[in-house]
Image: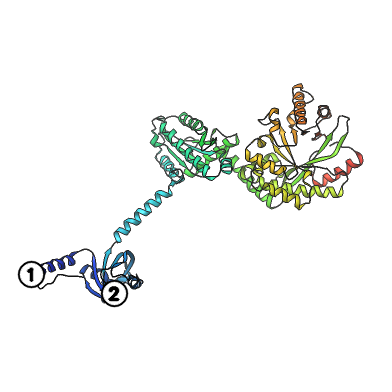
Amino acid sequence: MNLPDPETTDDSDAYAALLQFLYRVPVGLVQTNLDGEVEMMNPKAAQMLMPLATDASLDNLFQVLSPMAPDLRKMSLAVTAPSGEVCDSLRVDVSVPLAGGRTVRSTLSISIFKFDGNRLLAMLGDVTLEVQREQAGLERRLRDAARLDLLTQMPNREVVKDRLFAIQTQQTSDDQNEFAVLFMNCDRFKQINDALGVAVGDEMLGMLAERLRATLRLTDRVGRSSPAQHIAARVGGDEFVVLLDNLLHPDDAHAVAQRLLDVLAKPYGIGPHQLYCGVSMGVVMKAQASGDADAVMQDASIAMVEAKRAGGGRYVVFETAMQAAALLRSRTEAQLRQALAQQQLFVVYQPVVGLDKSGDIDVGSGVEALVRWEHPQRGLVSPVEFIGLAEECGLIGAIGEFVLDSACGDFMQWQRSHPQAPRLLAVNLSRAQIEQPDVVSMVAKTLQTHQMPAHQLQLEITESLAAQSVLVQQQLSALKALGLTLALDDFGTGYSSLSSLHQFPVDVVKIDRSFTAQGDTSAHHRVLIEATVRVAQSLGMQTVAEGIETTSQAAVITALGCDKGQGYLYSHPLTAEQMQAWMARVSTEGNVDA
């Protein structure tokens, strides 16, 4: 360090002042040669370094600091220029053992500069408190981030739980104020994500979140509540919760719930797209709220599922009976998963016969494959009890694939062993399956595995599914390109009309049993059946009447020109073994009575 010449009076005064400064400065200063040998050190530096010197020697800075910063010597030698920075604010953790086995931990900041060709200047500082403050700030920011949804900048589930806990804790027996939890799930978010991509889905969620916030802000006062006392949070992928506090009357929650449904159902303009994505909402009022915050939110979620099951775009207020129903669904779901693994599911077949106005019946026209469940304790479980549940919990795809594989295997075995084997196999295709990107390859692989000609397979979809979206239309076209046929199942129960029948890429129209059942007693239903047959024929489509149970129904259906019939009049659904016996009987007797 260049110091004034102490031989002159002026320099002597300056030198003394500099020494006084170096003595009092709260920063450790050390001057060394390039090897780290100490040439000058102020008291502050000695105070900080002495506890670190294992041999009580402060002769070499690099040696003292080597346990904490072993690369200082190498870093110094790497600076080949006459001057330059060796390190700046390098932080090292220091542990100093004390008597009694205690240890004092601190953080040292080291800055070293080469200020001429032969000397180094090191500045040392104790930044323990600064590091602690930084750590505390970081922990605070991490806690805040853990309570914030980054996509929507909304509070998350933990915030809602804490606030709900506080509300429940503050409630007293004579407290007349109401609160409500509104649990929302988007009705069509998955379709939007699948069709347009995650980026569009994220943008829509952000817009939905802003609508939630804006609607609550515009709710000037609900009872004595101010907007600041309401919380809107994102608690899952496309799930949101609104917590309303300090309401004067339960009807206030109903008003807010309906207002939110109306606002969120409006279209979202994203780029060239006008997207519609309403919500299903479950509501838990103070009177129904029991248990902790998690339990209340779970009840609101249960009510939301009921709203979705009722068609979506609405809210349902929680009732305790819903818990039992949800528990039953949960148990049934677990049992259904076990049924798949343990092969409790099996396939039955209902024959489809060809009709002719001459009275002839073609018993080899086809069969429809249907799934059944033989529960080890409950016995035969009706499809009504588990098909809808399988769609809700995501099992319908696996079940559908099982049915297709089993049915194709049985069908080809019949082709090899029975002269009256059905010529066509019909299998239902669920919404979940048609939305799977690999459904076409799955069907193609199944056909190849069983060496089954594609033209002998008919996949059946519901009317409402066929009209769903461009994605569904593309999947149906790809399936049809395999060479199989497509059938529109349960026609007449959906939202389309005869005028839109030409829009569906199908080969067969199956007239719903609700029309067939009244065909022999209602002129109105006969007109509808006849119109469906004629429109289908004009489009080159065949028709199948479902649910024929009496000879009079069969006579009307046949007279109206329907190509095929299916129902208990001809046969109940049969197991694979029963189906073989049925084929053997009709081949010898020509009798198709059930």
Residue closest to the far top? 523
139 sits left or right of 412 in the view: left
From the top left corner, tell me how far across and down residue 119 is, in percent.
26, 72
Q: As drawn, which residue projects farthest toward the right?
A: 588
Which of the pair 469/272 is nearer the observer? 272
Name the residue: 75% across, 36% down: 507
What residue occupies the far left of the structure in this picture? 9
Amino acid carrying mark 1 in the image: Thr
Return the residue nearer the eye: 559 or 146.
Answer: 559
Display coloring: rainbow
Task: State the image coordinates of residue 52 (x, y, percent, origin top left).
Answer: 29, 72
State left or right for residue 328 relative to residue 243.
right
Residue 318 in sight: no
Q: In the structure shown, which secondary structural element does the residue marked by tag 2 occupy?
A: loop
The quadrant the N terminus occupies is bottom left
- The quarter of the picture where the C terminus appears is top right
Q: Residue furthest front?
A: 81
Instruction: Find residue 467 and report its image quarter.
Output: top right
Name the residue that disc number 1 marks: 9
Question: Up-down: is 316 above or below 200?
Answer: above
Q: Residue at x 71, y 37 (%)?
A: 505
Amino acid at the residue labelled 2: Leu
Q: Which residue is mark 2?
A: 34
User: What residue sits 33% from the left and 68% below the top?
Assistant: 95
Q: Secondary structure at mark 1?
A: helix
Taking depth in this image into account, of 25 and 410 the one nearest to the observer is 25
Q: Position of residue 284 (x, y in %)?
A: 50, 36
Q: Is residue 248 visible?
A: yes
Instruction: Give me the C-alpha separation between circle 1 and circle 2.
Output: 33 Å
User: Of the residues under marks 1 and 2, which one precedes in the sequence?
Assistant: 1
Q: State the image coordinates of residue 131 (x, y, percent, origin top left).
A: 32, 59
